[in-house]
Amino acid sequence: MLSRERAVFLLREQANACGAFGSPLYMELLGHVADDVAAGGTVFDLLEPYDAPNARADALALRLMAAVHRLVLTGEAPALAAHYPSVGGDAPNPWPAFADVLGGHRERLAPLVALPCQTNEVGRAAALAFGFFEAARSANMPLRLLEVGASAGLNLRWDVYRYGGGGATWGPVDSPVDLVGLWHDAPVVLPSTIRVAERRGCDPRPVDPTSPEGRLSLEASLWADQEARFARLRGALHVAARVPAEVDRESVADWLPRQLGELTPGLATVVYHSIVQEYFSDAVRAAFPACLEEAGARASAGAPLYWLRLEPVSAPELRYAVTLTRWPGGEQRIVAWSGPHGSAVRRADP
C-alpha cells in the first residue's frame, strides 16, 4: 500500500515536471492534490491502493490526471471542462471544479486510475527522424522498422508525417501530422524518399488507435492544456486508420530475439524506442542490449542493423539524446538532442 508521504512526494515531483515541460494547468492541479493529501484529505483514497516504488514507471500522478481527463473528454465533467483547453475551455481557477470531480465521481474514477498511462507522443518522431535519416543514408536500402514499447504504434508511421525547421522541410506536404517547427536545426541528411518495407512493434499493453476506446485512452493521457500535442495526436490517428502497422502484445524480452533471429538481406533493420528504458525491469535492461549485440555480430553490409533511441542521459544534467548504433562495426554516436516530447530538436556535433 502507498503511504501518504510517498503520495505527496510523487504528486509534487510530477507537478514540477509538468511545469517544466509546459503544462501550467497540470502543475497547478497536482500541487493542490498534493496539498489535499498532505492535509489528510480524501483524495488519498484513490491513490492508496497502489504501491509506487518506481516513480517514473508507475506514473501514478499522471494516471490520476488521465482518469479525470477521460471524464472531461466523455462529457461526464462539464463544469471542469470549462477549464480544459482540450475541449475548448479556458476558465481560470480550475481547482474547485477538479475537486468536485474527485469527490463526486469516486466510484467512476477508482478503476480508471488503475489503467496504465499510455502516452504515444508523436512529437518524438521529429527527434527520431535524425537517426532514421542517417540509417537510410548509410544503408541505401529499404528500412525494416521494429519499435520497442510502441504503445499504439503511431511512431511506426513516422515517415508519413511532415517535419520542418532550421531552414528545411521533409515529408508529405498534405500530412495530417504537422511537426514543422520542432526542428531547431535541420538534419545534415535529408533523403528525398525513404522506403519502409515493414512496420512492427511490441508493447505489454498495446493500444488500438483505430478503436474508440484506444483513441480515448490516448487522448486522456495527454496533458489537457498542450493543444499542439493534441493536434499532432489527432492527425496521427487519421494516419493510423490508413497506414497499417502491427503491434504485438508481448514483452521485449520474448519479442526481440525472435525478430532478430534472422536479418533480411536487402533490408536495414532499425530497432528503436523513445522514453522506454526507464520502464524496463532490471533483467530486461541487462538482456536488451545483449540481444542487440548478438544480432549485431551477425549483421553485414547487405543486412545491417541499427539501434536508435531517444532516452534521457545525465551528462552532466538531465538531457534527452537521440543515439544511433550501427552494425556491422558497432559504431555509436549521438545524432541529436531534444526535449522529452520531441521539441527544439538540435543537431549534435559530429
Image (cartoon, helix red, strand yellow):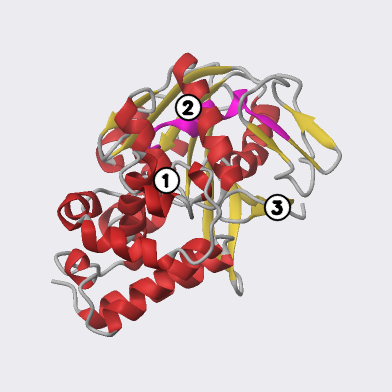
**Spot occupied by residue 293 in the image (x, y as percentages of width and height):** 43, 44
Sequence-first disc among 3 and 1: 1
User: Circle 3 sits in a helix, a strand or a loop, which is it?
Assistant: loop
User: In the rendered image, which quarter contains the N terminus?
Assistant: bottom left
Residue 157 is inside the magenta segment: yes
* Identity, as a three-letter code, of the amino acid under mark 3: Ala
Q: Which residue is mark 2?
A: 237
Left or right: 110, with 257 as reference point: left
- Find residue 123 and report its horizontal and vertical position in percent: 58, 42
Q: Residue at x 34, y 34 (%)?
A: 202
Please name the residue that numbered disc 1 is placed on.
119
Amino acid type assigned to the residue bearing label 1 in the image: Thr
Residue stretch in magenta: 149-163
Q: Is residue 329 visible?
A: no
Residue contact at pointers 2 and 1, CB within 8 angstroms: no
- Mark 3 and mark 2 in contact? Answer it, CB < 8 Å: no
- Give residue 180's position: percent from left, percent from top: 72, 37
Q: Which mark is residue 344?
A: 3
For the residue labelled by badge 2, is the local secondary structure a helix, a strand or a loop?
helix
Mark 3 or mark 2, whichever is nearer to me: 2
**Of 324 and 60, which appears nearest the observer?**
60
Q: Nearer the viewer, residue 305 or 94?
A: 94
Looking at the image, tell me whether mark 3 or mark 2 is earlier in sequence order. 2
